[in-house]
Structure formats: structure tokens, C-alpha cells
Amino acid sequence: MHLSALGLWAGSAIMSTAVAAIAFPAMKALDVRIPGLALDDRHYRFVAGELAQRTFLVADIVSFACAIAAGASMLALIVAGKAGVRGVNAIVRALGLSVALAGLGAMLFIITPQINAASRLHMAAAKAGDAAAALAHAKAVDDLHPIASTLMLVQIVGVLAALFGGAWSVARSSGPSLAAPGSPYPSPALLKSRR
């Protein structure tokens, strides 16, 4: 369950980031237009932003559930002394999971609400024809974007570190050979160096 939760969390975070990275240039290239929005000529920002916001909402729900499952199962593994959760591997896994949780928490509770609020205000100001307010809210979104990108990268790196550490533990605890008796295939090279 631990590795499955980490894998799903990593996949969700990576895919949502990819969707956003693809949506903005694609909508810009398509030169999409929103009827009734004459003030801001960058309509693609609103369309791609809405798509990205909905994608991130789903990813946030999946990530939050996976974070709870990964954290609880990691704690259970540590308490039970199972699956190689000790030594350097335990430190790497715990550190990776802690970093990922911090990145997710900052995104969920600080950055995402601010970006979503600024995006809504930007759209409302653009529809109302208030150029100064629209520009101020667009700048707020632009200022928060690098922070959000960094936090997503931190989250992904942390989850992948915990995932690879967990996979390494499972491989190491599987015994000196994963090959079936009499198998013509050799044991994996990483496992041959086992102490």
C-alpha cells in the first residue's frame, strides 16, 4: 500500500503539472476567444487557467489521499520494524516523504487558494472592464506562479525519493535472488552486492 500510494501521488503530481505546461501554450497557439471579454486580449490565460485549475483540483484530492495513506503506512512500517525501514534508507524515505508533505501542504493551504482567488478576481475585473484591477490581479497570479512551480517540483522530488527508497527496501528484503530456482535468468545485479 505504501509504494502504491507514493506511485499514485507521484503520477498525479507529474501529470497535473504536464497538463498545465501543455494547456497554456496550446490555448495560446489556438488563439481562443471568450465572448464578452474585450478588455484582456490574452484569453488563452483564462481558458488554460480554468483547465489547469480543474486538473490541479483533482490532483490535489488524489495527492492528499495518497499522502495520508503513504504517511500512515510509513508510520506503521517504522513501528512494526518491517520492509527495511532502518538506517540510511529510512532517513531518505522519511526525509523524502516529509519534504513532499511540506510541499503539498504549502500548495494546498497557502498558494493554491491565493492563485485561485487572484484568477477569479482577474476574470471578474476583465469582464467588468476595470483594466487597472485586471492588471493587478494578473500580476498577483504571475507572481505566485514561480512559487507554485517550485513547490510542485519539491513535492515531486520528495515523493520520488520516498518511492525509490521504498522500492529499494522491497528489493533488498526479497532475498539474495529473485530468480526462480533453476531459472536461466541471473539475479539482478543490484541484489548481488547485498551484505
Image (tube, grey):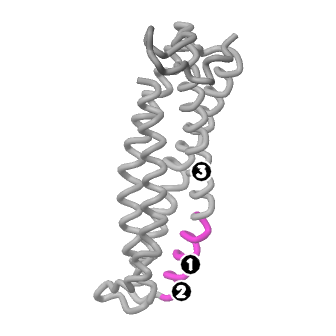
Which residue type does callout 3 highlight? Leu
Magenta includes 5? no
Which residue type does callout 1 highlight? Ala
Structural crowding at the residue carrying mark 3, measured as other residues with C-alpha within 10 Å and reported as few (<14), some (14–19) or many (≥20):
some
Q: Do callouts 2 and 1 mark residues in contact (Cβ within 8 Å)?
A: yes
Q: Is residue 6 left or right of residue 84?
A: left
What residue is at 58 percent from the left and 58 percent from the top?
149
SS for dot 1: helix
Q: Label 3 to label 2, Cα distance in Å?
A: 33 Å
What residue is at 62 percent from the left and 68 percent from the top?
143
SS for dot 3: helix
What residue sits right under mark 1 in the picture?
Answer: 136
Structural crowding at the residue carrying mark 1, measured as other residues with C-alpha within 10 Å and reported as few (<14), some (14–19) or many (≥20):
some
What residue sits right under mark 2 in the picture?
Answer: 132
Observer-nearest residue: 153 or 130? 153
Q: Earlier in the sequence, mark 3 or mark 2?
A: 2
Q: Label 2 to label 1, Cα distance in Å?
A: 6 Å
Q: Residue furthest left?
A: 35
Q: Is residue 122 left or right of residue 191?
A: left
Q: Is residue 6 left or right of residue 139?
A: left
Image mark for residue 153: 3
